[in-house]
Image (cartoon, rainbow, N blue to C red):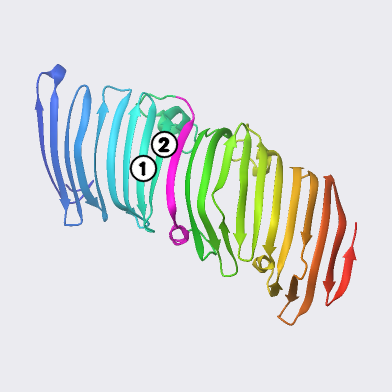
Amino acid sequence: VEKAMRGRLQAIAKVDGPIANLQADLVADWQDGDDNWLKLQASGNADRAVVESVDGLIADRRFQGSGSVQLPTPIAVADIHLELEQPMPEVGHATLDAKLNNGVVRADLEARTSNGATSLIQATLPLQGLAGLPELGQAIANLPVEQDSGPLRFEWQIPEAEWGDLLADLGAELALSTLSFGSVGSAAFDPARPLAGQGEVVINGLEVANQDLQIASDGPVTLRLRGNELILEPARISMESGSAEVEVWAELVPAWQPGAPLDSAIRRFRLEANGNTPLTLLSNFVDDVYTDGDLQVAVSVAGTPESLIGEARVLGEQASVHLGSPDGLRLSDPRVEIAFEEDLVRIDQASLRVEGNEVALKG
C-alpha cells in the first residue's frame, strides 16, 4: 500500500448468498513496523453492519473497540465501544460506550487521568440539539442518521484529587500551588439558550492555595440553576486565620445566547457575605505590603451593578499594613461603612490610623 498509508495490508473478504440478501465478512491486518498496526474483523448484510473487533496501535496510541450500525439510512440504531490507552499525555486510559437510538445518542465516558483520578461522564444528546452548536451544526445536518430534538443532558462524577498540575499540563496558566476538589452534578439545557436550562453542581473538598494564601471550603459548595435563577447555597470558606460565609442569588435572562456580553445575562442579583478575612489577601493585589491581622466583613447588597441597595461594612481592629517594607508607613484600624441606595453610594464612615493618627472621611 503506497499512497494512502505505508506498510503491509493483508485482507480476506468473503461474500455469500443471493444478491437480495448478501452476507459479507472481512478480516484485515495492516502493519507498518512494530509501532503502527491495525487488526479488524467485520461483517454485514443489507440490514446491519458489525465491527466485531478492531485493535491497533497508531502514533503510540493503543486502542480497541467494536460497534454496529442498523441499515439502511437514515440510520436509526448504532452503537460503539472504544477503549483508548493514553489518548493524550494527561489521560492514561479512557473507555467510551455510545448508542444511537432514534436520533438520540447516549454516551458513557470513563477516564483515568494522570493524577490518579477516574472520572465518569454520562450524556444524552439529541442530534438536533447538537446541531444548534455552531461548530457542529453543518456536520450533523449532513449525517445520514435520524435526528431528534430536546435538551442536552449531562451527569458527572469527579473524585476529589489534586488538579492543578494536570490543568497546567493542558496549558492553563494558574499561579497556584494547590487546586484540589471533586464534583458531582447534572445539567440539562438547550445550547442556544443555556440559561433557560436546569442543573446542579456540587464541589467537594475544595482547596486553593498560592504562595501567599490558602482557601478551603468547610463542606460542599452547591450551585443550582433552575427557573431562570442561579443560586449559590450558603457556603463557608476558611482562609488561614479567617473564615467567611457567602450566599448568592441571581435572576438570569433566559433568552441570553452564547457570544452575547456576559453582563447582559443577569437581570438582578443578591449577595450576602459575612466573616473574618485575613489582611494577607491584600498582598495578592498590591506589591510591597506587609500585613497583620484580620478584617471583619459584612456585605448585603441586591439589585443590578448600576442600581444597588444594601450596605457593606469593614472593621479591622488591630489590623495593620506597612507600605514598602516591614518598617514602612503604618496604616491601621480601618473602619468603613458604605450604604448603597440605587444610584447613590453614601459613605457613612471611613477611617483609619496613619502612624497612630486618625484620618476620617464621610460623603
Residue nearest the viewer, comparing 164 with 207? 207
Q: Where in the figure is residue 62, as x and y percent of width and height?
A: 25, 51
Q: Which residues are magenta?
A: 149-170
Foreground: 221 or 117?
Answer: 221
Q: Find out whether the residues at labels 1 and 2 contact each other: C-beta distance under 8 Å.
A: yes
Q: Is residue 150 magenta?
A: yes
| Residue 54 vertical placement versus 215 (above, below) | above
State which quarter of the image contains the C terminus: bottom right
- State the mark number for residue 109: 1
In the displayed structure, does residue 335 sit left or right of residue 136? Answer: right
Element type at mark 1: strand
Kind of residue at disc 2: Ala
Q: CA distance from mark 1 to mark 2?
A: 8 Å
Residue drawn at x 75%, y 72% as measured from the top left: 320
Q: Is residue 327 magenta?
A: no
Picture mark count: 2
43 relative to 137 in the view: left or right: left
Task: Please determine whether, in this image, residue 289 is positioned above or below residue 248.
Answer: below
* Quarter residue 11 falls in: top left
Residue 77, by quadrant, is top left
How far from the left and from the top, in percent, is residue 133?
A: 49, 35
At label 1, which amino acid type do we have?
A: Leu
On the image, the x and y values in percent for residue 321 come to 74, 73
Q: Residue lying furthest top in this view?
A: 20
Q: Is residue 131 visible?
A: no
Instruction: Identify the residue position indicated by label 2 in the image.
Output: 123
Q: Earlier in the sequence, mark 1 or mark 2?
A: 1
Name above or below for residue 323 compared with residue 344.
below
Please give the name of the residue rendered at 33% of the width and 24% of the height, measured from the top-left corner.
76
Answer few, some or many: residues within 10 Å of disc 1's Cα (few below 14, many 20 plus, some between 14 and 19): some
Residue 156 locus on image (x, y percent): 44, 42
